[in-house]
Image (cartoon, grey):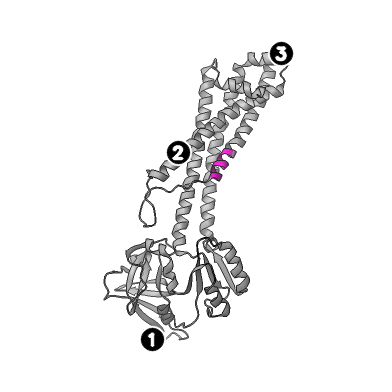
């Protein structure tokens, strides 16, 4: 066994002549323990929150979306798109025609996005989980239906159970100049009953989802679409599929995956997590550097032992390593215990959810979400190891200098 490590381990558990040394060492262990546990719990909580937010967004966000580089619409009935529609690996291929319009219900009105979708849109089974009123139905016997977001519901006060009071949708007529004596002649006005209200997030909740045929009639657009949304079968590599589409589709279109569709969201989630990590790491550093005081007092307490070691031929390097190992063992003990307790807390939260969060959304779970990643445990362990080594090395150097001064005084 390494001599320095053996002596350091003996010092760690040996009784000290001054009780303050034990107290300071215990405080150091406790500080690192609390810091490590808090860091792993907070990082895991951010992982869970990130997964939850992305799950909410992914409910309404396709895996891939194809849009034109220039203009608002494009022709979907080309050779390439007809082949893509039948490509292996595609679960749903949705043609979308969308535009802002004025929505009116009873005496209330609001501007919202009217999104016309083809029948494949309803293949997304997770849509039902977003419904807070009514049902997610777009087509019925001889009639079209709309499903609106909760933001529109709040403005318009739509009653989904009243079939005799439909939602009125106003859209400017194509190619018609304004200035008519009757402003109503400048708009296409269609009525559609509302079958349900969904709630996901503010960016989506100002949308009225309607059948594609209704949107074509409203916008007077018989052929073109605004975008194509694609969901893939399970096990299909989205990145690989996206690369294949980009190669075949040409430069006139852009293909975006979920990250590219919500770049700002992913950047915010990542920056928030790293900001919290940096803040808690500074707190952890303060706890770790308490070891300097503990090791300095230990040096004073063990001057006789050090004198004996020196007389036996131990050099300064050996003495430095003794106190280096001593400091590392104190801080790493706190780190390992903190990681274990943090892991236990996270597992209990996942199982029982005793820390609750507000449940105003049907997608949200009752317990605060936790996402465990082994990389977070490795990150915390390496963080403590690096700063523990720095603090212990500094303490060891100061301790040797202290011994030299004491020897000169003697």
Judge whether residue 290 can be spotted in this image: no
Judged by depth in the image, the label closer to the viewer, 3 or 2, is 2
Of callouts 1 and 3, the N-terminal one = 1
Residue plotted at (53% across, 80% down): 77
Q: Secondary structure at mark 3?
A: helix
Q: Which residues are magenta?
A: 374-381
**Position of residue 161 in the picture relative to residue 227 (left or right):** left
| Closer to the camera in the image, 30 or 102 | 30
Q: Residue at x 54, y 47 (%)?
A: 275
Image x and y of residue 151, in percent = 37, 65
Name the residue tied to disc 2.
344
When asked about the image quadrant of residue 178, the answer is: bottom left
Badge 3: residue crowd in 10 Å (few <14, some 14–19, many ≥20): few
Q: Quadrant of the N terminus?
A: top right
Q: Which residue is mark 3?
A: 311
Marks 1 and 3, how far apart at CA = 106 Å
Mark nearer the N terminus (3 vs 2): 3
Badge 1 vs badge 3, beta-carbon distance below 8 Å:
no
Q: Tag 1: Cα neighbours inside 10 Å, few (<14), some, or many (≥20)?
A: some
Instruction: Give the secondary structure at mark 2.
Output: helix
Q: Residue at x 38, y 44 (%)?
A: 352
Q: Is 230 rendered above or below residue 33?
A: below
Residue 185 - label = 1
């Amino acid at each position: 066994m390494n001599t320095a490590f053996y002596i350091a381990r003996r010092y760690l558990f040996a009784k000290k002549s001054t009780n303050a040394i034990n107290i300071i060492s215990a405080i150091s262990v406790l500080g690192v323990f609390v810091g490590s546990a808090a860091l792993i719990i907070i990082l895991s909580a951010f992982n869970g929150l990130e997964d939850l937010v992305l799950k909410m967004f992914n409910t309404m966000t396709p895996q891939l979306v194809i849009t034109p580089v220039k203009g608002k619409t494009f022709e979907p009935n080309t050779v390439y798109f007809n082949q893509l529609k039948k490509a292996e690996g595609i679960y749903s291929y949705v043609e979308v025609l969308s535009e802002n319009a004025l929505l009116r219900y009873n005496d209330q009105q609001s501007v919202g996005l009217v999104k016309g979708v083809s029948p494949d849109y309803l293949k997304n089974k997770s849509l039902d989980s977003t419904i807070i009123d009514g049902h997610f139905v777009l087509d019925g016997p001889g009639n079209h239906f709309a499903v609106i977001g909760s933001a529109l519901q709040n403005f318009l006060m739509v009653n989904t159970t009243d079939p005799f009071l439909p939602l009125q949708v106003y859209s400017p007529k194509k190619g018609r100049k304004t200035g008519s004596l009757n402003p109503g002649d400048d708009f296409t006005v269609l009525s559609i009953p509302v079958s349900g209200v969904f709630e996901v997030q503010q960016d989506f909740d100002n949308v009225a989802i309607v059948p594609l045929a209704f949107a074509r009639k409203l916008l007077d657009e018989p052929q073109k679409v605004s975008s194509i949304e694609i969901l893939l079968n399970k096990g299909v590599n989205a990145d690989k599929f996206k690369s294949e589409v980009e190669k075949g589709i040409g430069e006139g279109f852009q293909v975006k995956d979920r990250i590219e569709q919500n770049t700002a969201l992913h950047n915010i989630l990542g920056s928030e997590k790293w900001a919290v990590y940096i803040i808690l790491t500074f707190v952890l550093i303060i706890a770790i550097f308490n070891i300097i005081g503990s090791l300095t007092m230990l040096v004073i307490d063990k001057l006789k032992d050090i004198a004996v070691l020196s007389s036996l031929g131990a050099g300064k390097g050996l003495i430095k390593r003794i106190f280096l190992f001593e400091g590392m063992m104190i801080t790493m003990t706190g780190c390992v215990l903190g990681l274990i307790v943090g892991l236990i807390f996270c597992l209990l939260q996942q199982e029982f959810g005793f820390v609750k969060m507000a449940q105003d959304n049907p997608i949200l779970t009752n317990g605060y979400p936790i996402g465990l990643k082994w990389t977070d445990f490795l990150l915390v362990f390496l963080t403590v190891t690096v700063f523990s080594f720095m603090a212990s090395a500094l303490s060891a150097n100061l301790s040797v200098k202290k011994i030299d001064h004491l020897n000169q005084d003697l």
